Image (cartoon, rainbow, N blue to C red):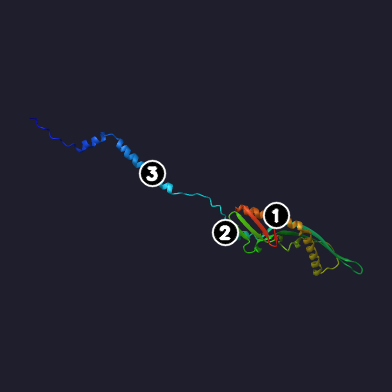
Amino acid sequence: MKKKKAKQTPSFLQQCRQLLRRPALPLILIAAAAILGIVSGLYSTVKHSSIELGADDRIDITPQQIQSIKAIGEWEFLAISDEELVDTVRKGFFSDDQLARIYYGTIRLGIDLHQVDSGWIRAQGDTVELKLPRVGLLDKDFIDETRTKSFFESGRWTAADREALYQRAYQRMLAHCLTPQNLRSAEQNADKQVRQMMRAMGFEHITITYQQQERD
């Protein structure tokens, strides 16, 4: 009678070799399932999370910008040079005294931004509204007395006589230079330059009005 051989338990090394000899398909399936689960989880997260990208096209004008515009002060839009020959005659018993002088001056037309009213500028989105002082004479001392010349002088003349001659020259310059045509030209230049400044700040729709007078 033959003796049965005792069944030997495979060693740990042999068990590892047997596992390595088994087909690798189950392991591949397990790895694929794990990857699929990760991808599915990421998709679900992205699907329920939205990122919105948009441009904020609002234009806000700051108090510092408003102050910098006001700091321009007297903004000149038209300058007219003029010269006036003014004379006066004083009748005498034997002869007449005569005084004639030539005066030079420059009439400067523009707006004084120091005179703006409260709330003179309002901005919303790409629209800005401005209410500006009316275009007018910037400098009342427009005669350059250093360039005044005596054209002809005979007899004796007092300081009061010369002051009267100066005032006549002053009024003549105002009449010849401060004309409706020159004022319109200055206002057109003002409208153009103010709009250019506002467009440079990003505004597209600009409305300009003037104190005591409106312009579209």
Q: Nearer the viewer, residue 152 or 183?
A: 183
Q: Is residue 128 above or below residue 47?
A: below
**Callout 3 secondary element:** helix
User: What residue is shown with label 1?
Assistant: 189
Does residue 92 appear left or right of residue 61 in this picture? right
**Callout 1 secondary element:** helix
Q: Going from the N terminus, do you reach mark 3 or mark 1 first? A: 3
Density class for disc 2 (Cα within 10 Å; few <14, some 14-19, many ≥20) is: few
User: What residue is shown with label 3?
Assistant: 40
Question: Which corner quadrant of the image does residue 35 belong to?
Answer: top left
Q: Quadrant of the N terminus?
A: top left
User: What residue is shown with label 2?
Assistant: 62
Disc ID at residue 136: none
Query: Residue 122 at what x, y percent from top left?
Result: 61, 59
Residue at horizontal 76%, vertical 58%?
Answer: 180
Residue at horizontal 22%, vertical 37%?
Answer: 15
Q: Nearer the viewer, mark 3 or mark 1?
A: 3
